[in-house]
Image (cartoon, helix red, strand yellow):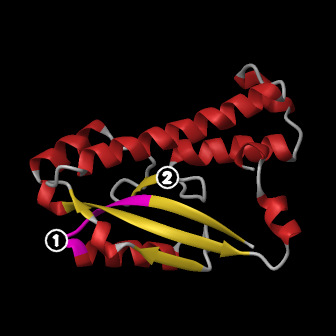
Amino acid sequence: MKIENSHYLLALAPDQDHAADAVRRFFARTQLVRYDKVDVDQQAIQAADTPGFWPKVDEALARNRQVLQEIIEELKKSGIRSLDDLAGLPQGYQSKLAHTATHLLDGFFGIDSVFYSLVEDSHWISEPLGREIRRNPEDYYLVPVKAELFFAKRQQLVSTLRSFES
């Protein structure tokens, strides 16, 4: 059994090869997520000066927002209505959801990350970075990644999924 994830990482690099190398180094060194297999799609890397760059970035950012919204909806189903409700949140499924939402907001990469900026260690693109990318598009690359986690037993796989992922 396996989980397959797709990610898009924004890299600042002098060329496509260096951008791919930066992404590979990130996955090799990050302590937050350990995949069994990480493939950079070298042929699909897009520089910011190519026509498909911004539409793909916008799509990936929208998917990050969708993941965050799904987590928020799941928390609402469990009774969370305000920040004050978090103080009484029991440890377990709901606290893991809150933890994942916080990671999306604070910039810790996780398996839920669709878009991730290595430039800002963020799931978003700040306005200043967006302006910088538009001024110097030849320096920025969107690097698509396919990653896999393998599980010996189906139970191991199912136990890692939250209900909105299954």
Query: Where in the figure is residue 50, as x and y percent of width and height?
Result: 16, 55
* Foreground label between 2 and 1: 2
Left or right: residue 32 compared with residue 11: right
Q: Tell me which amino acid carries mark 2.
A: Val
Left or right: residue 140 compared with residue 146: left
Query: Where in the figure is residue 4, as x and y percent of width and height?
Result: 60, 66
Q: Which residue is mark 2?
A: 114
State the residue at coordinates (44%, 72%): 26
State the residue at coordinates (18%, 41%): 131
State the residue at coordinates (39%, 43%): 59
Residue 162 within the magenta-colored segment of the rendering = no
Secondary element at tag 2: loop
Query: Where in the figure is residue 102, as x and y percent of width and height?
Result: 62, 43
Q: Is 63 drawn above or below residue 148 in the view shown? A: above
Q: Which residue is mark 1?
A: 14
Span shown in magenta: 8-16
Q: Quadrant of the N terminus?
A: bottom right
The image quadrant that residue 54 belongs to is top left
The image quadrant that residue 129 belongs to is top left
Q: Looking at the image, which is closer to me, 9 or 40?
A: 40
Q: Looking at the image, which is closer to me, 19 or 39?
A: 39
Query: Where in the figure is residue 53, as x and y percent of width and height?
Result: 25, 51
Q: State the CA–CA distance, disc 2 to disc 1.
A: 24 Å
First in sequence: mark 2 or mark 1? 1
Disc 1 crowd rating (10 Å Cα; few below 14, some 14-19, many 20+) is: few
Q: Tell me which amino acid carries mark 1.
A: Pro
State the residue at coordinates (59%, 41%): 67
Secondary element at tag 1: loop
